[in-house]
Amino acid sequence: MERIAKFLNTQGYEASWETAEGGCLLHARNCPYHDVARDNVEPCVMDASLITQMAGVAPQRVQWAFSGDNMCTYFIKNGG
């Protein structure tokens, strides 16, 4: 998870993570695609795909900035 957060930070995010029951939570603030994603969810799909490739398991979005949350948060299950 540290590798994923570090990569996202190089792309302009303010990413962090924490352990959670059964996996971990990846928090992404300061989305560099925020204005584009307002009209097109493709950047959000791209982010989830990137996280899937890096983590080896598809993340479950539990917070989404465009639904009123202050960041996007993904739950990533341990061991796929």
Image (spheres, grey):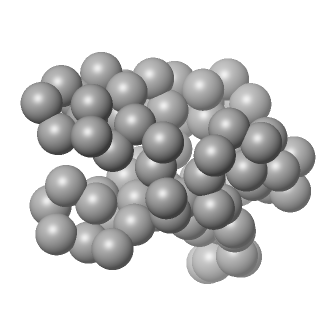
Name of the residue lying farthest toward the right: 3
Quadrant of the frame with the N terminus: bottom right
Taking the spot 18% from the left edge, 25% from the top edge, the residue there is 40
Asked if residue 36 lies left or right of residue 25, the reply is: left
The correct choice, above or below, for 7 with respect to 49 in the image is below
Quadrant assignment, res 25: bottom right
Asked if residue 27 lies left or right of residue 46, the reply is: right
Count of marks overlaid on the render: 0
Asked if residue 32 lies left or right of residue 1, the reply is: left
In the image, 65 versus 78, the foreground residue is 65
Residue 28 in picture, x, y percent from top left? 53, 59
Quadrant of the frame with the C terminus: top right
Taking the spot 33% from the left edge, 44% from the top edge, the residue there is 34
Work out whether residue 75 can be spotted: no
Taking the spot 29% from the left edge, 58% from the top edge, the residue there is 64
Quadrant assignment, res 42: top left
Name of the residue lying farthest toward the front: 35
Taking the spot 49% from the left edge, 32% from the top edge, the residue there is 47
Residue 62 in picture, x, y percent from top left? 35, 63
Residue 54 in picture, x, y percent from top left? 74, 30
The correct choice, above or below, for 25 with respect to 46 in the image is below
Work out whether residue 65 can be spotted: yes
In the image, 41 versus 63, the foreground residue is 41
The correct choice, above or below, for 30 with respect to 3 in the image is below
Asked if residue 68 lies left or right of residue 69, the reply is: left
